[in-house]
Image (cartoon, grey):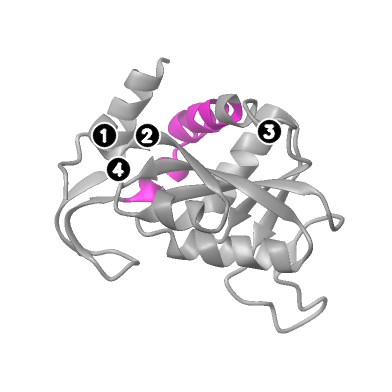
Amino acid sequence: MTREELARRVAERALLHGDFVLRSGRRSTVYLDKYRFETDPGLLGPIGAELAVLAADSAPLPARLAGPELGAVPLAASTALATGIPFLIVRKAAKEYATEGLIEGVFEAGERVLVIEDVVTTGGALLAAIGALRAAGLVVERALCVLDRDEGGAEALAAVGVRLDPLFRRADLGIPPV
């Protein structure tokens, strides 16, 4: 399936119209419900394959992928399967038992990590994940996302030295400008 066909199918499956409050606190008349495409193998597989194409543009290739919980974990797993690059899960908060880890998976300080995110609006959740990875000694210079809503997230990431490359922008999915 072409990227344009994938965009059409994602929009058909997951683009909702109404009155929504986004994670950023902003209101929107459109909402991309990531779980509607992340739980559909017919969409998750092709999205992972397309994210793998974007990941291949990294020079050098990352040692690890990372997906912030919860929404980006299936995307990181799908991309890991398509690339063969192991992935990490970045928790929102450290677990309170066993290893008490904030980052799940095997890694070594100094490794290059490519972060995979679902939807980026202002970049807040992604910035938190990047902060956790960097605090663990990992190098993060690039992130991928399924949708960049073009509402300042890319600029917020650039301010901390991270380039954001989206699979789709709002116009690709028929989302009107803000």
Q: Percent from the top left, x then y, of residue 138?
A: 76, 57
- Is residue 12 visible to us here? no
Q: Dot 1: what SS?
A: helix
First in residue order: circle 4 vs circle 1:
4
Residue at screen point 65% across, 26% down = 56
The amino acid on which the numbered mark 4 sits, given as a three-letter code, is Ala
Q: Residue 141: image x %, image y %?
A: 63, 47
Q: Secondary structure at mark 2?
A: strand
Give the residue displayed 56% in from the left and 50% down from the top. Answer: 162
Q: Looking at numbered disc 3 in the image, what kind of residue is underneath it?
A: Leu
Mark closest to the chain's N terminus, 4 or 3 = 4
Q: What type is the residue that disc 2 sits on? A: Phe
Q: CA distance from mark 3 to mark 1?
A: 25 Å
Along the polypeptide, which appears first: circle 2 or circle 3? 3
Q: Residues within 10 Å of mark 1 (few under 14, many from 20)?
A: many
Q: Secondary structure at mark 4?
A: helix
Q: Is residue 24 magenta?
A: no
Q: Are marks 2 and 1 in contact (CB under 8 Å)?
A: yes
Q: Do residues under tags 2 and 3 come within 8 Å of each other at their CB atoms?
A: no
Q: Secondary structure at mark 3?
A: helix
According to the image, label 1 marks what residue?
Answer: 173
Q: CA distance from mark 2 to mark 3?
A: 21 Å
Towards the viewer: 53 or 109: 109
Looking at numbered disc 1 in the image, what kind of residue is underneath it?
Leu
Q: Which residue is mark 3?
A: 81
Residue 168 visible in the snapshot: yes
Q: Where is residue 27 drawn, in percent x and y?
A: 19, 64
Q: Is 162 placed left or right of 20 in the picture?
A: right
Res. 54 image quadrant: top right
Q: Residues within 10 Å of mark 2 (few under 14, many from 20)?
A: some
Label 4 crowd (10 A; few <14 / some 14-19 / many >=20): some
Which residue matches tag 2? 168
